[in-house]
Image (tube, rainbow, N blue to C red):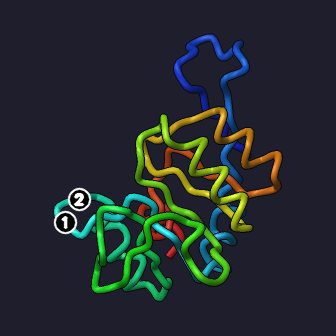
Amino acid sequence: MREVENSGDPDGDRDDQWVNPDPDEIQELLEKSKRVAVVGLSSDPSRASNGVAAYLLSQGYEIIPINPKETEALGIEAYPDLASVPGKIDIVDVFRRSEFAPEITRQAIAIGAKAIWFQEGVVSVEAFELAKEAGLTVVMDRCMLKEHVRFS
């Protein structure tokens, strides 16, 4: 069953809805993906981005830190933006405020990412629509760590 999400409309009658992939699709995405660019990855171990990326790294994912304020995170060279990363990206995992989601989505589309994953609390219908129109898999308002644990 597909889960219809709603960003603040209790009646569910506005056009500000999105649909996350089925659990099977999320599981397949997690299993088939290898390279994850973490936008907003902090070198501070107390930050959620650091904990999630460290977990993903421990599970065999290649993590690419994206943060113009960092030179490295988790001992890995950081890049200022997605366009600076060499090679293909499977998932762009976003730890930035919702207002930045559309621009990050445009960058993810431009580099040919397969999927964009917005962490818990990151919601943008505009970003969702941009990504879907470009053929990206979109997961919104979900924690990649929690989803990975759920399917492990």
Q: Residue 5, located in which quarter of the rendered image?
A: top right
Label 1 Cα neighbours within 10 Å, binned few <14 / some 14-19 / many ≥20? few
Report, in whole angstroms, how far the alpha carbon at label 2 lies from the one at label 1: 6 Å
In-front residue for pair 151/17: 17
Q: Position of residue 126 (x, y in %)?
A: 66, 34
User: Mark 2: which amino acid?
Assistant: Arg
Query: Which residue lies at the image location 37% right of the left edge and 85% below the top edge?
Result: 58
Residue at (30% x, 75% y) in the render? 71
- Would you place residue 27 above or below residue 61 in this image? above
Amino acid type, callout 1: Asp
Measured as percent of width and height from the top left, residue 36 is found at: 53, 74
Q: State the residue position of label 2.
A: 47
Q: Which mark is residue 146?
A: none
Query: Residue 142's x, y, as percent?
Result: 49, 50
- Where does the image place residue 51, in percent across and percent down from the top left? 28, 68
Label 1 SS? loop
Q: Is residue 24 above or below residue 64?
A: above
Residue picked out by circle 1: 44
135 in relation to 113, above or below: above
Image marks 2 and 1: residues in contact by CB distance under 8 Å: yes
Q: Give the quadrant of residue 69.
A: bottom left
